[in-house]
Image (tube, helix red, strand yellow):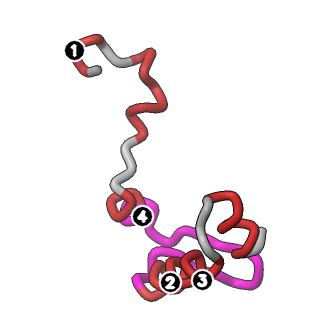
Amino acid sequence: MTQAELGECLGLTTVHVNRTIQELRRLELIRLEGMRLDPRDLAALRTLAEFDDGYLFLEKRSRAER
């Protein structure tokens, strides 16, 4: 997937996608070689993105947790 295609899917400009990828590389959170992007520190990426996968498993949560 190219940066332009990724931007199109996410509703972002190619410039924004490129700058974000460069920042993630600078922080050593990802490695980009050719057309392959590898996460180097998945936990740090989750923290940076404030990602919480709890919403993916709503049926397993009790009513008190919702």
Q: Amino acid at mark 1?
A: Ala
Q: From mark 1 to mark 2, how far is it between C-alphas?
A: 40 Å
| Residue position for label 4 | 45
Q: Earlier in the sequence, mark 3 or mark 4?
A: 3
Q: Which residues are magenta?
A: 27-45
Picture residue at 61% right of the left edge, 74% below the top: 13
The Cα–Cα distance between marks 3 and 4, rounded to whole angstroms, is: 20 Å
Query: Which x, y percent locates residue 11?
Result: 61, 61
Q: Which residue is mark 3?
A: 15
Q: Is residue 51 magenta?
A: no
For the point 52% across and 84% down, the residue is: 19
Name the side, left or right, on which 14 lies relative to 1.
Answer: left
SS class, disc 4: helix
Please give left or right for residue 54 compared with residue 13 in the image: left
In the depicted view, which residue is nearer to us: 54 or 16?
Answer: 16
What residue appears at the point 59 percent right and 67 percent down from the top-left corner?
Answer: 12
- x and y percentages locating residue 22 in the rendered image: 52, 86
Which of the labelled discs sits on residue 7, or is there none?
Answer: none
Name the front one of labels 2 and 3.
3
Q: Where is mark 1, residue-wise?
A: 64
Residue type at tag 2: Arg
Kind of residue at disc 4: Leu
Among the two numbered marks 3 and 1 on one chain, the one whose residue lies closer to the N terminus: 3
Q: Nearer the viewer, mark 3 or mark 4?
A: 3
Q: Amino acid at mark 3?
A: Val
Q: Distance from label 2 to label 3 (Cα)?
A: 15 Å
Mark 1 / mark 2, whichever is N-terminal: 2
In the drawing, what numbered circle is on residue 25?
2
For marks 4 and 2 on the same chain, the one whose residue lies earlier in the sequence:
2
Mark nearer the viewer, 1 or 4: 1
